[in-house]
Image (cartoon, grey):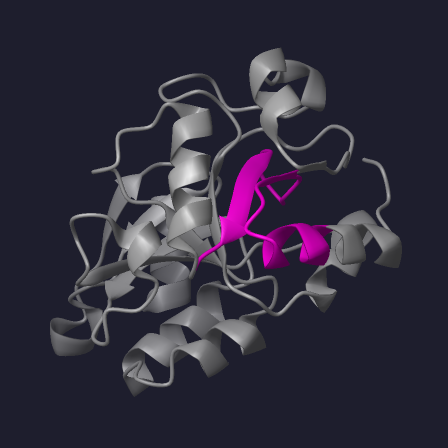
Amino acid sequence: MVALGPQDAQRLERCLARDGVALLPTDTVYGLACDARSELAARRLYALKQRPAERPAAVMFLTLEAALEALPELEPQEQRALRALLPGPVTVLLPNRRARFAPACGPEPGVLGLRVPALPEPLAALAALTRPLMQSSANLSGGPDARRLEDIEPQLRASVDVELDGGELPGVASTVLDLTRYASDAAWSVVREGPLTHGRLRDLLC
């Protein structure tokens, strides 16, 4: 893994502030990111990926504190679950009671996919960013996930505004966990298998 510094976080912040699309490392695979509140940036990210507009993306914060501050309407049970799960290699589906971050939610404004990566020490400088990011894997729609920059399609790399090289990553995309009914009846289910196993999730949530 390659260490990133404050200057990389500043480059990323400038890119996002100008409705740009960035290529960046996470705790799992490389991702594309833009400001989650910008419809212009969201349309560009989808176009770069050749991703259908009806497929939602995740909203990523780089610290759990920033995520909880941005979502004060979360129920106490949901907050406890997020504190147990995050930061970590999991995308959590939550009720989007105030229809936040519409560009990322697509045709399901009532559901929000939340991601807070557990940034390893070499990537910790990125935690200086507090803005919400719309995030999707750095591949063409349906393509394989990338653990190295060299795994990403050249046309995609050439089209982003900022590229951050974090070296080789673990390479397994995040677990997707549905908590949309967790506050009402403690129900949860795994939508996509990933680094957090069913058994580990049960330990954290029960």
Res 198 seen here: yes
> How many numbered badges does the structure rendering display?
0
Q: How far from the left and from the top, in percent, is residue 96? A: 24, 68
Q: How far from the left and from the top, in percent, is residue 158? A: 65, 21
Q: How far from the left and from the top, in percent, is residue 141? A: 37, 22
Left or right, 109 with reference to 126? left
Left or right, 136 with reference to 163? left
Q: Does 173 sit above or below residue 153?
A: below
Magenta region includes residue 29: yes
- State which quadrant residue 21 falls in: top right
Closer to us: 203 or 28: 28
The magenta stretch is: 12-36
Closer to us: 190 or 58: 58
Closer to us: 83 or 111: 111
Question: Which corner quadrant holds the C terminus?
Answer: bottom left
- State which quadrant residue 64 falls in: bottom right
Magenta region includes residue 193: no
Q: How far from the left and from the top, in percent, is residue 189? A: 22, 51
Question: Which corner quadrant holds the N terminus?
Answer: top right
* Residue at x 69% of width, y 58% of height: 13
Closer to us: 52 or 142: 52
Res 153 seen here: no
Q: Does 101 sit above or below residue 26?
A: below
Left or right, 37 with reference to 163? left
* Residue at x 31% of width, y 86% of height: 76
* Residue at x 33% of width, y 53% of height: 103
- State which quadrant residue 24 falls in: top right
* Residue at x 69% of width, y 23% of height: 149
